[in-house]
Structures are given as structure tokens and as C-alpha cells.
Image (cartoon, rainbow, N blue to C red):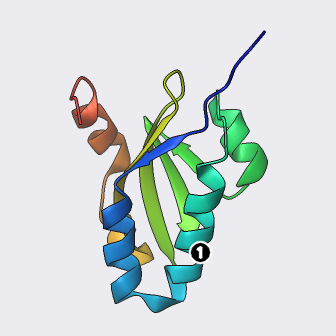
């Protein structure tokens, strides 16, 4: 019998802080957190099936949040979503996500 544990979310305070500064995303953040805590993602396609606008960039899963972007690392085997960054679209465009993905490999965050 297979037993799947719902995802745990790390970096929640980062989301709350950002939502406090950007009220238009507050409802999305609350809904996303509630939904993810019920999910049992086992592969990137599970995320893409639900969030079609999500992108896989290197190790990161990038979610579109209204006019903002959120970068997460997902540890599928242990059921952890780690919110690493959230910001405006303009801020997102200034980051080289492929390079950032390579820098995060091997780190224990």
C-alpha cells in the first residue's frame, strides 16, 4: 500500500512578509499555501498539471503570482517545498535563474 505525505512548506514567513508589502497577492499566497499543504507532488509534471503557468528553470519551480514571481525548490521524495524567493516581475527578470540553480546545488538550505 502506498502512503503519500502532504507537502510541507518552508519559507512561509518570506511569503507573508511579501504579501504584507504587496496586498494584491495576499489572497493568492493564502490559497496557494492551503492547497500545497494538501498536495502530494512526486514529480515536476504534478505541479505543471495544476499550475500550467509554472516553469521549471534548472532546479527551481517558478510560479506566476499575479504580476509577481515566486521561486521554489521542491524535494519530491521527502515532500518539501522551499520558497526561496518572491518578488516583482521586474526583479525576477534581473536574476539569472540558471546560474542561481547551479549555485544552490549541494547546499543544505
Q: Is residue 54 visible?
A: no
Quadrant where the image shows the N terminus? top right
The foreground one among 71 and 36 is 36
Above/below status of 77 relative to 6: above
Q: Does any portion of residue 73 appear in the rendered image?
A: yes
Instruction: Name the one closer to the observer, 104 or 18.
Output: 18
Residue 19 found in image quarter: bottom left
29 shown above or below 23: above
Q: Residue at x 34, y 54 (%)?
A: 11
Can you give x and y, in whole percent of width and height, for residue 64 in the image?
57, 66
Quadrant position of residue 5:
top right
Disc 1 residue crowd, few under 14, some 14–19, many 20+, Cα 10 Å: some
| Foreground of the two, 89 or 18 | 18
Residue 67, image x, y percentages: 53, 80
Residue positioned 74% across, 14% down in the render: 2
- In the rendered image of this protein, does residue 99 appear above or below residue 68? above
What residue sits 54% from the left and 28% below the top? 76
- Residue name at image x 34 percent, y 87 percent: 21
Horizontal arrangement in the rendering, residue 3 relative to residue 67 (left or right) = right
Mark 1 — residue?
Answer: 28
Task: Give percent across and percent down for residue 109.
Answer: 24, 37
Residue at far top of view: 1
In terms of secondary structure, where does tag 1 sit?
A: helix
**Residue 56 placed where, x, y %?**
55, 42
| Foreground pick, 72 / 67 | 72
Amino acid at each position: 500500500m502506498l502512503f503519500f505525505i502532504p507537502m510541507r512548506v518552508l519559507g512561509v514567513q518570506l511569503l507573508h512578509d511579501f504579501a504584507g508589502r504587496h496586498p494584491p497577492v495576499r489572497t493568492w499566497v493564502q490559497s496557494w499555501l492551503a492547497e500545497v499543504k494538501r498536495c502530494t507532488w512526486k514529480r515536476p509534471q504534478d505541479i505543471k498539471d495544476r499550475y500550467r503557468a509554472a516553469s521549471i528553470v534548472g532546479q527551481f519551480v517558478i510560479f506566476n503570482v499575479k504580476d509577481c514571481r515566486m521561486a521554489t525548490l521542491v524535494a519530491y521524495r521527502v515532500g518539501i517545498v522551499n520558497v526561496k524567493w518572491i518578488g516583482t516581475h521586474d526583479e525576477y527578470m534581473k536574476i539569472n535563474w540558471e546560474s542561481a540553480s547551479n549555485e544552490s546545488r549541494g547546499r543544505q538550505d
